[in-house]
Image (cartoon, rainbow, N blue to C red):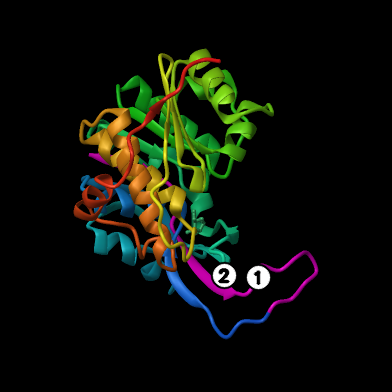
Amino acid sequence: MLLVFGSLNVDLVFEVEHLPAPGETVLTAGYTRLAGGKGANQAAAAAKAGAAVRMAGAVGNDGLASIATAGLEEAGVDLGLVRRREVPTGLAVIGVERSGENSIIVAAGANATVRSADVADADLVAARTLLLQNEVPFDQSLDLALRAKRQGVRVVWNMAPAKRLDAAALGAIDVLVVNAGELRMVAGADGEPLALGRGLSGGHGLDVVVTLGGEGALVVTPESAGRLPALPVQVVDTTGAGDAFTGCLAASLDEGGSLDVAARRAAVAGALSCTALGAQAAQPRASRIDEGLALLPPMQPLTVS
Ligand code: RIB
């Protein structure tokens, strides 16, 4: 079972010709209200990819709560550890421009009330894999990661939004998932993704998966490195592509897949998730991921230069 500890939001999605520059106002005809939040997006993606998923998090005591959980219910995620708190539900305002590029502002709301103690030890050890992101309080995620590590539960952490990590935090992670900008922030250094990934992986004994958008992904372990190409798709909206990637990666690992196999499935899920508006709408189910896998070229091994 995969336990996802993280955020649930409602996304207000505005389709615009171009994203506003600082000080600029742009007009559009309307907006769409969709389920979102990095935690919920990843939980939904993992369930659609075939994993048994339980979500731990919080929504508010307002009318947005049912929208935030709707996609999870539809995907078959267990919501037994999603609390209802006397604050507003988390809310994101998302602009999506014609190219599919987006910009996002998130108000944490109930996500700020999430605590490691919300997950009892019995619930933690019932999981094989714990999946984290950074839209709930970081100290609570770290506490839960350290508890998971002590219990032998695998920790997959999508460091988004990014945060500089010390050795203790890096030591709590089995698989780190980041994009290139997040990788620089985590490492606290500039440099090529491959070199930074190797430094973190070799230095702290963890696997590092770097998503590179249309350039594919890097998969770095202490012993090896490889580059996965991207699956070409017609991009409508890139919102949640990293979440679809991460959710599918964690699902495949939880089901016993190797890191290479999990990353291939994740690359397909991430690409396909960009083909419709919204973070959860185009997340593929296992059968579509399998079809896409047949079209994805193999991983290229990378040697040290
Ligand atoms: O990663 C995309 C997500 O980021 C959106 O669904 C939004 O809610 C923000 O959390």
Residue at numbered disc 2: 98
Mark count: 2
- Residue 210 locus on image (x, y percent): 49, 35
Q: Is residue 190 left or right of residue 75?
A: right
Query: Which of these two is toward me, 15 or 151?
Result: 15
Could you tell me which secondary element the residue under label 2 belongs to?
Answer: loop
The residue stretch that appears in magenta: 1-26
Q: Is mark 1 within 8 Å of ligand 1?
A: no
Callout 2 amino acid: Arg
Residue 180 included in the magenta stretch of the image? no
Above or below residue 49? Residue 168 is above
Q: Is residue 189 visible?
A: yes
- Residue 194 locus on image (x, y percent): 54, 26
Question: Of label 2 and label 1, which has the lower sequence position?
Answer: 1
Identified at 27% across, 45% down, the residue is 293
Residue at numbered disc 1: 18
Residue 5 included in the magenta stretch of the image? yes
Q: Is residue 57 visible?
A: no
